[in-house]
Image: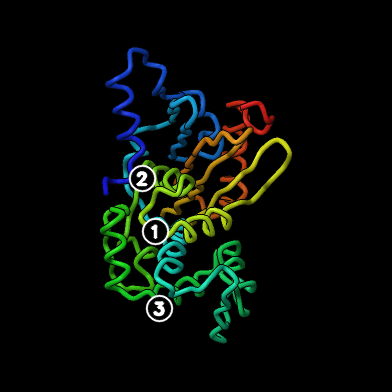
Amino acid sequence: MKPISLFMLAAALWLSACSPNNVKEVKSWEKYFSKYKLEGCFMVFDNGQGTFRAYNIDRAKQRFTPASTFKIFNSLVGLHTGAISDTNMIIPWDSISRPDQEWNQDLTMAQAFRLSSVPYYQEVARRIGRDTMQHWLDTVQYGNHIISKVDTFWLDNSLQISPDEELGLVKQLYFNQLPFQRRAQELVSALMLREETPKYKLAYKTGWGITGPKKIGWMVGWIEENKHPSFFVLNFETEDPALDIPAVREELMRSILTEEGFFKGEK
């Protein structure tokens, strides 16, 4: 299977197209990052039009810890291999109290995905096992494929993936094009759905990682209007300990997509 890189797809479109409009770097999006003094990138791929718009393409090709965005892949492998029977499967709380109180309870996969429960997904990874996990990382060519310890490798900066690759992954997930059972892909796509209105469907997974003094923020998913999907990814870093990462990544995602004309049901 070829690497899950949407930038490579965009580059191919650029090289083969007569018009430069298929790939465009959007400098105006810089204002959303400058507001919070962030180094970051944002990309949107309009599947119907075949257009690719991006801010800071150089960063989009760099790899970072996936943090909780890895729950997409972890869920797929868990469901495909039978380590997890379905998204209603409960993993009992291990009775270890953690700062995030919502994690301190028995959870289903659906709940754990929404709450971004690290302990639940660490247990999923342990049940999958190192060798099986490595097989699927290699098969899909997820980022750099590197595993350190089976229940921490997506958190400790061993495994790394680029925003471009993240975008490619969710695009293939949406169209059931990954080498997993269709059922597994459909279940994970359903887990990602966060909003459904008469005008649009919004699906995504967030992430928050730490690399030295830097905090890495992620959001990757798609917005669908009139059954027409567009795929997006947000990635940024900050050393500001006071920055409200969940609020800021939500603001950036909505601001940029709104500027691009989404949420109106007109795409």
Q: Residue type at mark 3?
A: Arg
Of callouts 3 and 1, which one flags the residue occurring earlier in the amino acid sequence? 3
Q: Earlier along the polypeptide chain: callout 2 or callout 3? A: 3
| Up-down relation of residue 97 to residue 4 (above or below) | below
Instruction: Report x, y in % for residue 143.
Output: 31, 52
- The picture places residue 12, in percent across and down from the top left corner, at 29, 28
Percent position of residue 47, x then y? 47, 32
Residue at left 33%, top 60%?
157
Is any atom of residue 32 visible in this view?
yes
Q: Mark 1 = which residue?
A: 180
Q: Between residue 123 and residue 173, name the one nearer to us.
A: 173
Residue under the point 33% across and 12% down: 18
- Count of residue discs: 3
Q: Position of residue 169 (x, y in %)?
A: 40, 48
Near mark 3 (Cα within 10 A), the count class, few <14, some 14-19 or many ≥20, is: some
Q: Residues within 10 Å of mark 1 (few under 14, many from 20)?
A: some
Disc 2 vs disc 1: which is toward the camera?
1
Is residue 65 rendered to the left or right of residue 147?
right
Q: Which mark is residue 127?
A: 3
Of the residues under marks 2 and 1, which one precedes in the sequence?
2
Kindly identify which numbered label has been placed on residue 165: 2
Q: Quadrant of the C terminus?
A: top right
Q: Which mark is nearer the camera, 2 or 3?
A: 3
What's the residue at 32%, 68% (across, down)? 133
